[in-house]
Amino acid sequence: MSGSYDRIAQLCRDRGTNVTALCRKAGVSRAALSELKAGRTKTLTLETARRLADALEVPLAQLLGQEETDTEEARREWSDEELKVAYFRGADPTLTQADMDAMWQDAKDFRDFIIANRKRRTGR
């Protein structure tokens, strides 16, 4: 049994629920956690982990068993390359560098669009 599965099951017990009900609430396939429990997979996708954390109302770091500490590593600035891999390759490991570059540019364009709209609305 995986430590990740044990942690999720314990968080469920702490909240008076079970893994099956959690999966329903989070909109996550029960099979994903069954595979984790059986050891056929070692990790969850970032999206699955986020959904589970949201459904349990816990920080993602707690679901993943990571201490939330104020360390230099936690405060450091992430490079665009590191962020591209974290955001996109985690969701689809088959993405090429060109795919990630294009998606990253789309994300930056969207950010700029949101900022420009906010400035227009607020005059700032």
Image: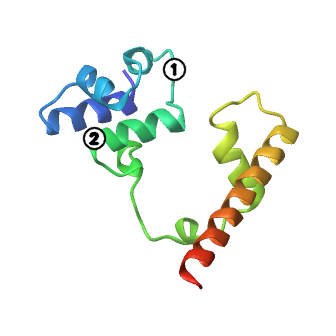
Q: Which mark is residue 41?
A: 1
Quarter-of-image position of residue 124: bottom right
How many numbered marks does the figure carry? 2
Kindly identify which residue carries mark 2.
56
Q: Amino acid at mark 1?
A: Thr
Q: Residue at x 41, y 43 (%)?
A: 64
Q: Residues within 10 Å of mark 2 (few under 14, many from 20)?
A: many
Q: Residues within 10 Å of mark 1 (few under 14, many from 20)?
A: few
Say whether disc 1 or disc 2 marks the residue closer to the N-terminus.
Answer: 1
Residue 40's spot in the image, x, y percent? 50, 14
| Residue found farthest to the bottom | 124
In the image, 52: left or right of 21? right
Q: Amino acid at mark 2?
A: Leu
Mark 1 secondary-structure assignment: loop
Q: Residue at x 51, y 26 (%)?
A: 42
**Cβ–Cβ under 8 Å for marks 1 and 2:** no
| Residue found farthest to the left | 16
Residue 75's spot in the image, x, y percent? 55, 71
Front residue of 75/88: it is 88
Front residue of 124/32: it is 124
Front residue of 26/76: it is 26
In the image, 98: left or right of 117? right
Instruction: Tell me: residue 40, above or below residue 12.
Output: above
| Residue found farthest to the right | 98
Residue 13's spot in the image, x, y percent? 16, 32
